[in-house]
Image (cartoon, rainbow, N blue to C red):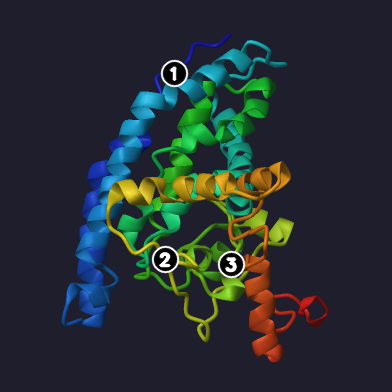
Amino acid sequence: MPEIPAFPNVTQLAIPAFVLLILIELWVLRRLRRPENIEVAGFETRDTTTSLLMGVGNVVAGLIFGFVAYGVLSWAYAYRFFDIGFEWYWVLGCFLIDDARYYFYHRIAHRCRWVWAEHVIHHSSQHYNLSTALRQSWTGVFTGMFVLRIPLVLIGFHPALIVFVGGLNLLYQFWIHTEAIGKMPRWFEAVMNTPSHHRVHHATNPRYLDANYAGTLIVWDRMFGTFVEELPEDVPRYGLVKNIGTFNPFKVAFHEWISMFSDAAQRGISMGDRLRYLIRPPGWRHDRSISGSEALKADYVLRNPDEAGKPGLPDKAMTR
């Protein structure tokens, strides 16, 4: 087996740059919009502080629990089919495959409440700026989604390389959390994830729900039918369909876990419904009293029939 390089922790090394870029973004937005207060510029002091605390908690959780995921991948690596080295082209190949893996993880995270319970943290801010990129989960390892990386280690990619390219992917995603950048050149928008594409992903407008799951390459969304373009006439509104209304980092971190288990433990429902509360999409209720994203989209088309069939929205045959 080739000697394992000492891969750097790129996300931790980038922390000073993250802070500097957040300050630059704040200055740019204030200059562009000339607001009377900082909130108008897309920043709110308590919200930004919460995002930063969630980022710190994510780093701490990784230090405490990261061995679980790495240990499982290391165990699986013993059963690999090939020995793949660490040359630049293998690093690139691992990055591209892991980026596809991230797309499917991200899609699952929005369609399975068990995974949504940890991912919802990233969507809980009603603002969209670079500090939002740091609003990360403390409980990601408990969802077990690291198993999606097992095929990579079975192919022969070393867990250290997989962790490294995953860090590069997260590093790329930092800069796309901003309203200070409009559209990039068309060729770039066609291939790469951009601020415009990712604003759609964070929006709660019906047409934008469950869209643009990409990490680095937007081509995955284009290939699998989940791409929706940002429209100037439908400006993104950020946050959750039902916002949590708190800046308490512990409530932000655990609110959906508590809500999910409370729903599953309620009296008078079947074991099947208890399980469905864990694995069905967010918003699912056994009595259908709360609408999921499909119902929200259908309701929007009923109220706006001219929008039927446009990207992100159902056609008339699907509305009821």
Task: Give residue 131's quadrant in the image.
Answer: bottom left
Look at the image and tell me in which quarter the C terminus lies. bottom right
Residue 312 makes an appearance in the image: no
Please tell me which residue is depicted at 38% across the width and 56% down the height of the picture. 175
Q: Mark 1 or mark 3: which comes first in sequence? A: 1
What secondary structure is marked by label 2? loop
Q: Quadrant of residue 38?
A: bottom left
Residue 306 visible within the image: yes
**Residue designated by label 1:** 5
Q: Residues within 10 Å of mark 1 (few under 14, many from 20)?
A: few
Query: Is 119 situated left or right of 225 in this image?
Result: left
Q: Amino acid at mark 1?
A: Pro
Disc 3, SS: loop
Inter-mark Cα distance, 1 to 3: 41 Å
Q: Nearer the viewer, mark 3 or mark 2?
A: 2
The residue under label 3 is 209
Question: Could you say which disc has been placed on residue 243 in the image?
Answer: 2
In the image, is 254 to the left or to the right of 280?
A: left
Relative to 317, residue 109 above or below: above
Number of marks in picture: 3
User: Along the horizontal axis of the image, is 236 left or right of 36?
Assistant: right
Q: Position of residue 202 (x, y in %)?
A: 48, 64
Task: Give amino acid for label 2.
Answer: Asn
**The disc label shown at residue 162, or none:** none
x, y percent for residue 2: 55, 11
318 w.r.t. 284: above or below: below
Disc 3 versus disc 2: distance between alpha carbons? Answer: 15 Å
Residue drawn where x is 20% and y is 63% of the image? 45
Of 135 and 302, the residue lying toward us: 302
